[in-house]
Amino acid sequence: MPTMGPMQDCASIFPHSADFDPAGDFDAFLKSVPAKWVVYLLADEADRPVQLLCVKNLRNSLKRRLGSDELEVPSKRVNYRELVRRVYWVRVDSTFESDCTYLEAARLCFPVAYEKMIGFRPAWFLHVNPDSEFPRYVRNTDLSLKTGQLFGPIEDKVGASRLIEMLEDAFDLCRYYNILVQSPDGKACAYKEMGKCPAPCDGSISIEQYRRLIEWSVRAIVDPADLIREHTRRMQAAAAQMRFETAGKIKQYIDELGAMNRGPFRFVSPLADFAFVALQRARKDSYAAVFLILPGSIEQIATVLSPEGAAGELLTCILHRAEVRPTGPIDRAGQERVALVASHLFATKNSTGVFIRLSELDAKSLARSYRELLKQEVNEAEVEGEGIVKELQPGST
């Protein structure tokens, strides 16, 4: 690889490159690049980034962008043949891997433009600080907060608002923050009269008692199963004592708690526990690429060939690597990685590999996930077209 100027920092992302000479043998140039799925970068004569793309067929993509046929018809499009002098690329084998690679390359090569172009929605979390003066749940996408606790990811902004409402209903939390901050001199709303709020606003309970109520609600997010088991025992005891109305109310409450762990809330956990192992299709049939996902980081750590290879030593390796987890606020790059992972966790189509919670990881779940991965349909690389997945260039701000 030739020595890189402004592209020097990108060497770790793009291990391959080819020089382009518009006066040279174009067919020979095309044969020097693979007709495979890649993330690639076009650079000019000064080795400055021109355009970043993810395509299913590098050879056909370059043929369309750099071929002389493009010059025969007048066009307002950029004349890449006159501008580009080098191509950098890296092979990818799954949508998840291509997204991860594209994000890191975009951030490095186009630090000003990339945020508007990468297309990943932010990851939605709930933030709460039970020890604040007037605690409350707030939907949030900023994972760099230094106080309180963050819980997520939640599928979208609407889901985050809905989860807050469910917590308020299940634990009789204050619905009107503007009144809560007047405690103990506020005027209670109708929820107090309905028996659905203990009214810390007017001093019916102290703010300190309200903080403990907030802490109790946090339990429903951290471990809803524990609360469900606790109230299931209460329900069974009430039914055994023929107190069926009470048992029915407890059953309704159990259903409310259970709903906090399903649908758009199925991946919600403390941010510190945002940890997964992802199995993705690899370059060869029956191979699986293994990614370790921790708060703010994504790392490919292995490639396995069989269900047996997805256990044993690999399990030990994963658990050892996961012992050292990032701590403290997550920077912007880390937040983008969390958002990327969240977008795949909530993907509607089963084409983004298999994700296992690190807390649920064992030899059996690894082997089972490997077999599940192989059952997924393979999105074959497009041979005739370039198969654009996404593209980014400086003028796209």
Image (cartoon, rainbow, N blue to C red):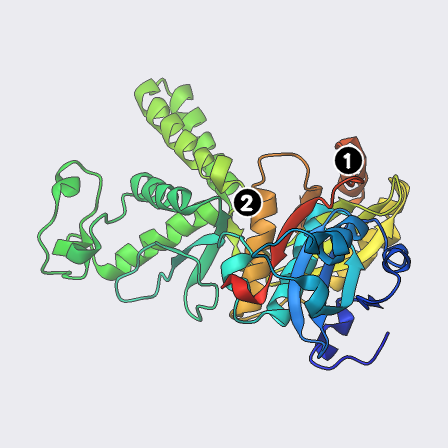
Residue highlighted by disc 2: 267
Neighbours of disc 2 within 10 Å: few (<14), some (14-19), many (20+): some
Amino acid on which disc 2 is placed: Phe
Q: Choose between 306 and 344: the one closer to the eye.
A: 344
In the image, residue 365 lies at what x, y percent? 75, 40
Residue type at tag 1:
Val
Q: Does residue 223 lie above or below 41 as drawn?
A: above
Reply above or below: 127 against 154: below
Residue at image mark 1: 378
Which of the two discs, 2 and 1, sits closer to the camera? 1
Whether residue 339 is visible here, answered yes or no, is yes
Q: In the displayed structure, does residue 168 sit left or right of residue 374?
A: left
Left or right of 374, for residue 125: left
Residue 336: x %, y % from top left: 55, 61
Whole-angstrom CA distance, mark 2 to mark 1, is 26 Å
Foreground residue among 31 and 311? 31
Q: Residue at x 62, y 34 (%)?
A: 349
**The N terminus: image quadrant:** bottom right
Compared to 258, does 362 lie above or below? below
Of residues 119 and 2, the one nearer the viewer is 2
